[in-house]
Image (cartoon, coloured by chain):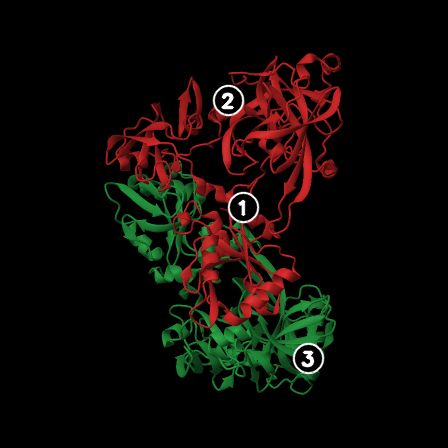
Amino acid sequence: MFLPSLLRPAVLAGFAAVCLPLGASAQDDPADEKTTSLGKQYESIVNVECSALRVDYRTPWNAATPSGGTGTAFLIGPNLFLTNAHVISDASRIVLKKVGDSTPHRARVKFVAHDCDLALLELDPPAPAFLKAVPLSISTEIPKLDTTVKVVGYPIGGERISVTRGVVSRVDYQEFSHSGVDQHLAIQIDAAINPGNSGGPVLQGTKVVGVAFQGYSGDVAQNTGYMIPTPVIRRFLKDVEDGSYDHYGELAIQHYPLLNPAQRKALQLPDNDRGVMLTAVDSTGTCGGILKVGDVLLELDGYPVDSTGSIDIDGEQTEMAEVVERKFVGDSLKLKVWRDRQEQEFEVKLKVFPAYLMQAHQYEKQPEYLVHAGLVFQPLDHELMTAFNLTSLRTRYYYEYYAQDEIYKDLPEVVVLTSILPDAINTWVRDYAGQVVESINGVKIKSLKDAAAALAKPPEGSHVVIQFAGEGRPVALEKGLIAPAHERILRKYGVASDRYLAP
Amino acid sequence: MKFRLLSAALLLLLALPSQGTAAPSPETSILRVNITSQGFNFALPWQKQRPSTRRGLGALLPGNRVLVTAELAQDANYIELEQAASGKRITARVEAVDYEINLATIVPDEDAGSFFQGMEPLELDVALKPKAALEVWQFESNGTPVSSSVEFNRVDLGPYFLEDQFFLIFQANGAVQYRSGTFTLPVIHQGKLAGMLVRYNSRDQVSDILPATMVDRFLKDVATPPYEGLPSFGVRMSPTLDPQLRSFLQLDAANGGVLVTDVTPGFSAAVAGVEQGDVILEMNGHKIDARGSYEDPDYGLLGSGHLARGKAQAGDIMKLVLVRHGQRRELEVPLLRKQAQDYLVDPYVFDRQPRYVILGGVLFQELTLPFLQLAGKEWRDRAAFRLVYAQANQDEYLKAGRKKLVFISGVLPAPCTLGYERLAGLIVNQVNGKEITDLASLAEAIKAPRDGIHRIDVVDGPRTIYLDEAQAKQDNAEFLPSRYRITAMENLK
């Protein structure tokens, strides 16, 4: 399975490897390009240079490493630029530059939505001359298949603004690579889009119909770029109207189609191609305690659900998730289900479902950690999993089934012994790196704070005893040896602070 | 015809002088063994895989038996014994095979006639000591004997054939050139069989030899039916080198001992009352050091696994001295034999068809390691995670009362399975309201659908699968046999 990658020229020097020759569409109409490249309509499209700080989860006590990249943003209102979240994530400094004006202007993030890869920037301080361009307006429509679109931005291959052209190839749900776990509506286009195009507008006429954001590299699929369509953009803009971004709400259910006649017969459902069977209802999610596994979802907010989970919105067949996509956290949703051979109606209030973020990329987050006698403990998440390449089957189980098996109910945080700073006190502990901590001195560990508290308390016996999930051999550390070793290790390995626990 | 007669006469002339007098040589004491194997297809268990033929070498033993490794003899369908020089062949069959100890004996199918005339069976050298000069016997493709010299220099425990099973290995140094079509090679010491070469590392020129002592115990076991095989101790152990762990476990600094970290339910140690957290100090009077090794009178320092398995016989009593909660105690452990099918997940399946049940196109199987290994060498990363996790945590399922892990391995598109085509790797909990503990219980449960519907409850995916009873019956009778050439809708043997 190949997932599309973000168009992220993260480090300018590092992108030669993915630098693809521009597609033929860039040369389709050289005359047009000549007349428009300095035209007024591109004045509002700016180059974003982002200096970012990337934290190393393997040395979470160290300062982050500077890195950076460039992308595109465009003016959509007074001192308001729209771009991709991935262009400005983990930013330490953002500057905007414009066609024909090389003065860099400082900007800051006003709102960021990592779940739909969008962000709003503002100049700080505002520069009236820079902001005098006419803002681009965002279309209310989803462009039709096979209609022409234009991508404008600052991709690799040169310094100045670039325009490419193509058609709308497909409208479908796609995984958004920036978070790695979210799916939203996305539009596939065949205009060449390349690293640096990210955050740039996709135009139809003078209106914005999307934001270019991800694509496949040429060795996977040809001429396959994706843009974030206007319903997702408009939803983001509406969400932040109240001054904060609330994330998408989730029904937090899973379903299975009802295509087999025996399913309908067993459930005594009429043979009308309606409904999907619920196969999971997360008990802390929107539908927890209301819907049950085995219920058949017949209607979602008045839209009849067909037996594959599709609904019909304005004559377009689309996934039923689209109903939820258009709502905001706190909004109500009406559900009609088939249970015990009759229709029942429920109303739920849309909630966010944080457990699914276990497998999401993390941004703007200072990693939590705890060092004790050279043993480094960190809460499990996607960044930890990849930074340490954790392969223990049990650790993988906690990671992959965290939401599905509702592990989060018992373990709000899964604490992992990620590494050991070698010292005489822990020389026999190294084999246990990568294991999940179950208990410390008999106390069950449900978060990194639990671990910190358990280790701060003197043990009853002569040893601090750490038990790992599924491991028969405990780690025992002699009480008297710990304090001097702890100091020694912090000093020797240059660990300025033995912990960071988020407030 | 003349030519054939001539060559037969020639052979006779060559063979005669060696009979009963000369020392054994490759020509007189080893044979080519050509084996056509055909295992079952674990994805489509009603059919066999494509047959494949391998050539190996076997050592002639008294009684016209030919010793080979079990690896060579796996899933044997058709066997020929061949005299390398003459090319003379007779058909043969497997007499006894043990895949754990990796040995098999092969005997002629019928009366061998004069096939073995002039040949010299090998005796076993069970008293081999390090530094001995060994010969590895092979043939060139034209039948010319080849002997490579290696030096036996180290004893260790290592795998023979199956993963994660460790037995006595003799390591020898020296170049061995692989000749065409040779699979297992007899190793000779002063005219006697010293063992079978099971692995050769050409870069380091190290040979791993399955020693004659293991051959000896296998042959003695075969000679006195019923075949007992190797016992299964059923513990996992961890070293106690860590001084802080030792003080925590209240072990004195001088003595060794290994910590029992896991006890498999139903196996020897668990049945006799060994517990997780026990520290084993002695096994059958041998002191166990903190690494888990003991001083073997013949071979020096060796892993204690040899005492409980390689050196033991099912039915033996293992005398343990252990420390539990700081108290020293003694325990007698009767050693039990566990067959592959006694595990929740069979660690190997050879010479038999995998068990399965097909209902309307839904294919139920009992999980086996060979099934998981269909995903390739990286099966732990590539096979369905739930199944991989279950294989690694079998105790949890055994404790929950399962005997075997029944799962849906796949779904054959059929009228009955509309909408279910993509289901695979789903562990089955219940069928028609009955708990499923093995395939036999599933075969029983599918006899009792309710209201014309089979209800199958699984761990993931759709959670409940409904199948129409009449459609399933019809597809089992017509569609599946004709489209997929399935001759039997179940194999429970």
Question: Which residue is at the front of the view, B3 or B57?
Answer: B57
Question: Which residue is at the front of the view, B409 or A292?
Answer: A292
Locate residue A161, reporting x and y percent: 72, 22
Residue B414 - label: none
- Quadrant position of residue B64: bottom right
Residue drawn at x 54%, y 76% as measured from the top left: B292
Name the quadrant of the C terminus of chain B.
bottom left
Name the quadrant of the N terminus of chain B.
bottom right
Check disc 2 and give the amino acid type.
Arg
Check disc 3 and give the amino acid type.
Asn
Helix, strand or loop for disc 3: strand
Above or below, comparing residue A216 to residue B385 in the picture: above
Name the residue carrying label 1: A382
Looking at the image, residue B217 sits to the left or right of residue B148; the answer is left
Name the residue carrying label 3: B153
Above or below, comparing residue A287 to residue B101 in the picture: above
Above or below, comparing residue A173 to residue A391 in the picture: above
* Chain to which the residue tagged by mark 3 belongs: B
Colour of the chain lettered B: green
Residue drawn at x 61%, y 20% as measured from the top left: A75
Residue drawn at x 31%, y 26% as measured from the top left: A272
**Label 3: how many residues lie within 10 Å, few (<14), some (14-19) or many (20+)?**
some
Residue drawn at x 36%, y 40% as measured from the top left: A279
Locate residue B309, reporting x and y percent: 49, 76
Marks 3 and 2, Cα distance to the nearest angstrom? Answer: 76 Å
Residue A234 - label: 2
Helix, strand or loop for disc 2: helix
